Image (tube, rainbow, N blue to C red):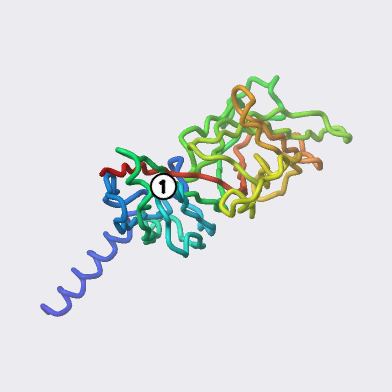
Amino acid sequence: MKRYALILLFLVACAGEAEITEDAHVGSSGVKAEYIRPTEFVLPGERVGFLIEVSNDGASESSGAYTIASDPLVLQLQDPTTGRFKLKGRTTFTPIGEKKVLSFKGRVSELAKREQTAEASVRFNMCYDYQTDATVSVCVDTRPEVDDEKVCVPGPVSAGGGQGAPVGVELVEMKLLPGDIEGVFVPRFTISVANLDQGVVLAQGIRNPCQGKGTLKEDFGRVGVRATLSNVPLQCKPFKFNAGAPGLNNVVCTLPEGVPDQPAYLAHLTTTLTYGYFDTIVQSITVQK
C-alpha cells in the first residue's frame, strides 16, 4: 500500500512540475555578449586574456559570426580572432537560452612604454540571423453597421513589449476593402515593426561587418516577412527597415481571396520576420608605465 502511495505522490509531483511554463516570446533581446571580469589596466609587454560570454536571450535559434579587434599599436591579439556560433533560444519549458564562453589572448605592445599612458578599445562584433514570431487576435467584422451583440469589436491591436527578439511587432491595424465579388471583403493589415534593441538590422545571412568587409546599402534593414490569417497565407509587400524614418516602420499584408460576409469573429494573425542583426560591445583598456 505504501508503495502505491509513493508512486501516486511521485506522479502528482511530476504533473505539478510540468505545469510550470514560461512564455518565451517576450522581451526584446536576441544574442547578447558580455565581457567576463574585464581587464581595465595593463602594463607594456604584459600578456592579457579576454573572456566573453555569448548568450541567446531570445526565443529563436540563431547562428552567426564574430570577430574581436583592437589597435595593434597598443594591443596585438592572437589568432584566432574570428569564429562562428550557433545557439538555441529560450522555449516554453527552457526559460534560459544556450550560452557559450569565448576566450581570446593578446600581448600589450612594448611601444606603449613611450607614452605615460596609452588607451585602446577592444571591440567584439557579432553578426547573426534571427527570427521574430508574433501572434495577435484580430476582430474581423464585415457588418460594422449592424448593432447586434458581437463577439468582438474591430480596432488597432497593440503587440508592444517584444516577442523575444530584437525586432518586434508593435501594432496591427486592419481595414476591410470591398472585393471583386459581391459579399466578399479583402482584409488589409498594416503591421508596425520596430528595432527594439541597440544593434543594426541587416539582411539575413549578411556577415560583412564581422569580416572586415563593406556592406551594400541594400543589405541594411532588409527583413523577410510572412504572415497568415488563421493559417491562411497573406500576400505581403517587400519590406525594408528604414532606421532613419521617424516613428514605426510599416509592412502591408493582404488576403486577396477575401473573406465572406458573416458575423464578427476573432482570427489569429501570425507574423514571422526573418533578418540579420549586427551588434557590438567595447571594452577599454589603459596601459600604464
Residue at 77%, 38% (x, y): give it.
260
Left or right, 223 with respect to 101, comes to right
Q: Of 10 and 66, which appears nearest the observer?
A: 66
Image coordinates of residue 94 in percent, x first then y, are 37, 58
Q: Considering depth in this image, is 139 or 116 the residue closer to the camera?
A: 116
At a point 28% along the width and 60% down the height, the residue shown is 17
The quadrant where residue 268 appears: top right
Tell me which corner region of the image, top left, top right, bottom left or bottom right, holds residue 285: top left
User: Residue 25, can we see it?
Assistant: no
Q: Could you tell me which residue is drawn at 76 percent across and 39 percent down?
A: 237
What's the residue at 63%, 27% (across, down)? 244
Looking at the image, can residue 137 be seen? yes
Q: Quadrant of the N terminus?
A: bottom left
Image-based side of 44 in relation to 102, left or right: left
| Image coords of residue 256 (percent x, y) | 81, 40
Q: Quadrant of the C terminus?
A: top left
How far from the left and from the top, in percent, is residue 45? 31, 55
Name of the residue lying farthest toward the front:
114
Please, is residue 148 above or below residue 267 in the view? above
Amino acid at pointer 1 = Val
Q: Residue furthest left?
A: 2
